Image: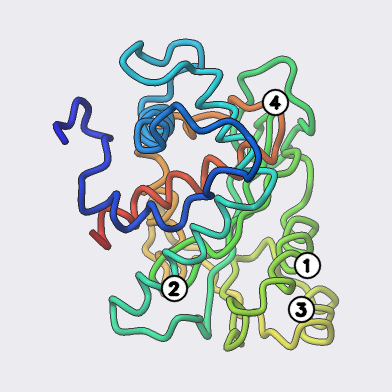
């Protein structure tokens, strides 16, 4: 199949991805739109950053593409595919499928849609918008992301991340240690994490004397992940009405990255 855009899926990538996509529902009309074309459109949107209605005409109708994207967000398809790819990529790099250590960080970004819900002001970063709370493994692969209003503190966001992560048994089977920065520091919070989940939080701080960019041990991995996500223009700001949609686009961006590596 000839590739029209740099984001198009190759034959090898499609062979890997197709078995993980939902099949047609029984009793309904046969699907008329090619699933591969839908996935090409979604990867184009996340990388190019265009609006749904500005999807080029050689892709399926934007309403069809959005419908599949939304349905797969609601039924958990994107998270299922993402989790499968994470385990495959870890094994491919010589690691066990489940990590024993992780890094947690947050990023405040401006919102670009007046209709967006769950919007707040981060006084520390001076940003009005949303905050992305991101947990990654030692390879920088996303384990889980939660998007909140920007005025939600890092510790409050971490509690949300931990609660969701605790429900995904295959990802936390071996998890023991989580590296964090100074915003998560505090005896009460660290004790609560240990008592509730049996996870140890280790704070890695930058020196007070350091100036400019400093490569922090262990935690540089999560900073690299932010860099990977920065290549997806849809994530340069938060363009979504729902925070759940913002989370899904991060999973889609990571699925594309891992798909290129695995195939």
Q: Quadrant of residue 162?
A: bottom right
How far apart are the two marked residues, 2 and 4, measured between alpha carbons? 31 Å
Which residue position is annotated with label 1?
Answer: 163
Q: How is the image coloured?
A: rainbow
How far apart are the two marked residues, 1 and 2, measured between alpha carbons? 21 Å
> Answer yes or no: do the residues labelled 1 and 4 have beta carbons within 8 Å?
no
- Nearer the camera: disc 2 or disc 3: 2
* 72, above or below 126, in the image: below
- Nearer the camera: disc 3 or disc 4: 4
Upstream in the sequence, badge 3 or badge 4? 3
Which residue position is annotated with label 2?
Answer: 87
Count the marks: how many? 4
In percent of width and height, residue 67 lies at 60, 28
Which residue position is annotated with label 4?
Answer: 241
How far apart are the two marked residues, 3 and 4, measured between alpha carbons? 33 Å
How far apart are the two marked residues, 1 and 4, measured between alpha carbons? 24 Å
Which residue position is annotated with label 3?
Answer: 190
How far apart are the two marked residues, 3 and 1, measured between alpha carbons? 15 Å
At x 42% / y 55%, what residue is drawn? Answer: 225
Assess disc 3: are there few (<14), some (14-19) or many (≥20) residues with their C-alpha within 10 Å of its C-alpha.
some
Upstream in the sequence, badge 1 or badge 2? 2
In percent of width and height, residue 95 lies at 36, 84
Is residue 41 found left or right of 178 in the rendered image? left
At x 68% / y 36%, what residue is drawn? Answer: 130
Is residue 147 found left or right of 134 in the rendered image? right
Q: Secondary structure at mark 1?
A: helix
Upstream in the sequence, badge 2 or badge 4? 2
Upstream in the sequence, badge 3 or badge 1? 1
**In this view of the protein, which residue sits in the foreground, 108 or 245?**
245
């Amino acid at each position: 199949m000839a590739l029209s855009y740099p984001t198009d899926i190759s034959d090898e990538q499609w062979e890997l991805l197709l078995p993980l996509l939902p099949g047609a529902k029984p009793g309904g009309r046969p699907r008329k739109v090619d699933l591969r074309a839908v996935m090409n459109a979604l990867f184009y949107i996340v990388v190019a950053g265009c609006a749904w209605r500005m999807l080029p005409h050689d892709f399926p109708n934007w309403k069809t593409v959005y419908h599949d994207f939304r349905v797969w967000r609601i039924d958990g398809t994107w998270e299922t595919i993402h989790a499968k790819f994470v385990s495959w990529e870890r094994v491919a790099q010589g690691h066990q499928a489940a990590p024993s250590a992780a890094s947690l960080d947050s990023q405040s970004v401006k919102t670009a849609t007046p209709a967006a819900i769950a919007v707040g002001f981060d006084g520390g970063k001076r940003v009005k918008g949303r905050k992305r709370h991101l947990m990654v493994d030692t390879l920088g692969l996303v384990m889980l992301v939660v998007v909140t209003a920007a005025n939600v503190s890092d510790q409050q966001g971490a509690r949300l991340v931990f609660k969701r992560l605790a429900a995904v048994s295959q990802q936390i089977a071996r998890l023991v240690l989580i590296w964090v920065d100074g915003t998560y520091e505090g005896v009460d919070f660290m004790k609560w994490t240990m008592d509730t989940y049996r996870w140890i939080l280790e704070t890695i701080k930058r020196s007070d004397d350091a100036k400019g960019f400093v490569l922090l041990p262990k935690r540089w991995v999560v900073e690299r992940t932010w860099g990977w996500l920065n290549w997806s223009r849809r994530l340069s700001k938060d363009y979504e009405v729902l925070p759940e949609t913002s989370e899904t686009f991060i999973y889609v961006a990571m699925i594309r990255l891992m798909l290129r590596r695995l195939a």
